[in-house]
Amino acid sequence: MVTFLLKNWIQMAGMAAPGKMTLSSSQQQGLIFGGAFLVAGIVLSTMVFPFWHLIREDVFEDTVILSNDNGTCYVETVDSVPKIIENCELNAGDDVTIKFGEDLAWATIVTP
């Protein structure tokens, strides 16, 4: 194994003059493709799909518990997305203030 690696290193050293490095056409094409791929990734991540779209704004809303199903409460909100509240000890009809991410289906009860 060491002999094979040493032989390849000697062959590579003989291909390039000291201080100069030349790339074959396939290596140049690979470098161009890699650079174009990197530029496309940067453009897509910053212009098309910005990171801050993943971070949702917290919404606070006063609402009424619709039902309690063994510790899981359900409420209706202004955005028309039913919210699920886990570990809920309240009864149907109780007024609560909840916090949820915009357009998400789960919420938490906020105590004043």
Image (tube, rainbow, N blue to C red):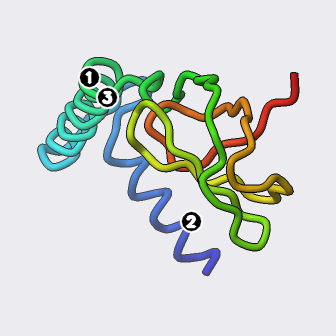
Mark 1 falls on what kind of element?
helix
Where on the picture, by quarter, is residue 73?
bottom right
- Disc 3 and disc 1: Cα gap in Å? 9 Å
Figure check: 83 above or below 98:
below
Marked residue nearer the N-terminal end (3 or 2): 2
Foreground tag (3 vs 1) = 3
Please name the amino acid that badge 1 sits on. Val
Q: Which residue is mark 3?
A: 49
* Residue 6 numbered mark, or none: 2
Figure check: 71 above or below 14:
below
Q: Is residue 12 left or right of residue 57?
A: left
Figure check: 69 above or below 51:
below
Which of the two residues, 79 or 106, is positioned nearer the viewer here?
Answer: 79
Q: Is residue 65 left or right of residue 81?
A: right
Please name the amino acid that badge 2 sits on. Leu
Marked residue nearer the N-terminal end (3 or 1): 1
Foreground tag (1 vs 2) = 1
Which of the two residues, 108 or 7, is positioned nearer the viewer here?
Answer: 108
